[in-house]
């Protein structure tokens, strides 16, 4: 700043001196005015920066500090009031939290394998060969009278616990009516699906255990002990409901055996979920045609 002031003083002396020529005086005046304008701009910029300087204020007392993670121990009164009192609701809440935790873990560390031949297929366990294969999950709804397939679907899910309601909707769409009794194996046991309003008025028999309970048997150690599971075990101990549930072995299981063993259909020829679903429905349609042909042949055969 001192050097700049000296330059201004020198230019002022040159402009006002008698020994300087007219050209020197004019250039000195121009440079003097330019320096004055630059000095004013720099002073204005300094004032502007000082006026918009950010101000840091302390947080108000009304702003609550971020809460630290709770330590493990007895829950607070507010937390205990929010927890459901019904044991069945608590079990559903725990199941939902476990599913959310598994989904978050899978999102952080994806472990799913990719199949370049058929990306829509999934790795599933083949219980017959005790191994894992790239496959689809085939679903069937069979009539208990003549083993006629009334609904058929293909899903990518590895388990059947969430397929009860979709199969019921497919059955109603194909048959145009609601069934009176629905019998499914233990893989379809799901408390959320069984409590759905869509099953109102339908007698649903699904065993919560791997084997149906007998009169004096006790549930396995890891069996579900919810209110719905205990009620279903009591119903399956009744002779009438037990007889209906035992008919499942001679209703839907023989259909899978006829398709796989008698006809030798163990693999899908097409790739992709949509094409495989169409192929599965074509297989089921030919199964019904064979049933109709054999029934007609038996009627036309001489006595």
Image (cartoon, rainbow, N blue to C red):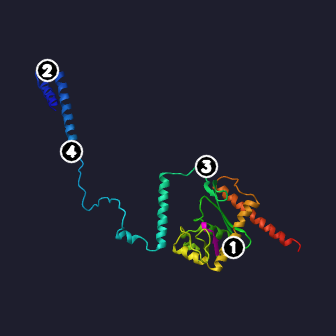
- The residue labelled by disc 4 is 50
Q: Residues within 10 Å of mark 2 (few under 14, many from 20)?
A: some
User: Disc 1 vs disc 2: which is toward the camera?
Assistant: 1
Residue 115: image tag: 3
Whichever of labels 3 and 2 marks the residue nearer the N terminus, that label is 2
The residues tagged by marks 4 and 1 sit, at their Cα atoms, a distance apart of 89 Å
User: Where is residue 41 drawn, in percent x and y?
Assistant: 22, 37
Tell me the crowding category of disc 3: few under 14, some 14 to 19, or many 20 or more residues within 10 angstroms, Cα based.
Answer: few
Q: CA distance from mark 1 to mark 2?
A: 124 Å
Q: Residue at x 47, y 73 (%)?
A: 87
Quarter-of-image position of residue 138: bottom right
Which residue matches tag 2? 20
Q: Which residues are magenta?
A: 181-187
Q: Nearer the viewer, residue 12 or 216?
A: 216
Q: Secondary structure at mark 2?
A: loop
- The 10 Å Cα crowd at callout 4, few under 14, some 14 to 19, many 20 or more, is few
Alpha carbon separation for disc pair 3 and 2: 92 Å
- Cα separation, mark 4 vs mark 2, equals 42 Å
Residue 111 painted magenta: no
For residue 201, say whether it is visible.
no
Residue 146 lies, in percent from the top left, at 74, 71
Q: Earlier in the sequence, mark 4 or mark 3?
A: 4
In this rendering, the label closer to the viewer, 4 or 3: 3
Using the image, determine if residue 217 lies above or below residue 153: below
């Amino acid at each position: 700043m001192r050097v700049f002031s000296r330059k201004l003083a020198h230019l002022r002396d040159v402009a006002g001196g008698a020994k300087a020529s007219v050209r020197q005086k004019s250039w000195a005046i121009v440079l003097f005015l330019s320096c004055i304008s630059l000095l004013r701009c720099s002073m204005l910029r300094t004032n502007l920066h000082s006026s918009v300087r950010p101000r840091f204020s302390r947080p108000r007392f009304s702003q609550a500090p971020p809460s630290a993670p709770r330590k493990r121990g007895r829950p607070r009164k507010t937390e205990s009031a929010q927890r459901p009192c019904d044991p069945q609701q608590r079990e559903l809440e725990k199941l939902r939290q476990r599913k959310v935790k598994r989904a978050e873990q899978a999102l952080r560390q994806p472990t799913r394998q990719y199949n370049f031949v058929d990306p829509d297929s999934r790795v599933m366990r083949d219980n017959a060969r005790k191994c894992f294969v790239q496959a689809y999950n085939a679903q069937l709804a069979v009539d208990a009278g003549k083993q006629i397939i009334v609904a058929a679907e293909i899903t990518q899910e590895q388990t059947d616990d969430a397929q009860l309601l979709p199969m019921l909707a497919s059955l109603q769409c194909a048959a145009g009516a609601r069934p009176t009794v629905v019998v499914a194996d233990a893989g379809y046991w799901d408390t959320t699906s069984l409590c759905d309003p869509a099953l109102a008025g339908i007698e649903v028999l699904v065993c919560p255990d791997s084997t149906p309970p007998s009169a004096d048997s006790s549930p396995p150690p890891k069996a579900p002990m919810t209110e719905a599971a205990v009620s279903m075990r009591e119903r399956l101990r009744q002779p009438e409901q037990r007889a209906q549930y035992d008919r499942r072995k001679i209703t839907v299981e023989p259909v899978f055996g006829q398709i796989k063993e008698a006809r030798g259909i163990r693999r899908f020829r097409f790739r992709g979920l949509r094409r495989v679903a169409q192929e599965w429905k074509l297989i089921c349609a030919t199964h019904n045609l064979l049933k109709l042909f054999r029934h007609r042949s038996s009627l036309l055969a001489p006595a």
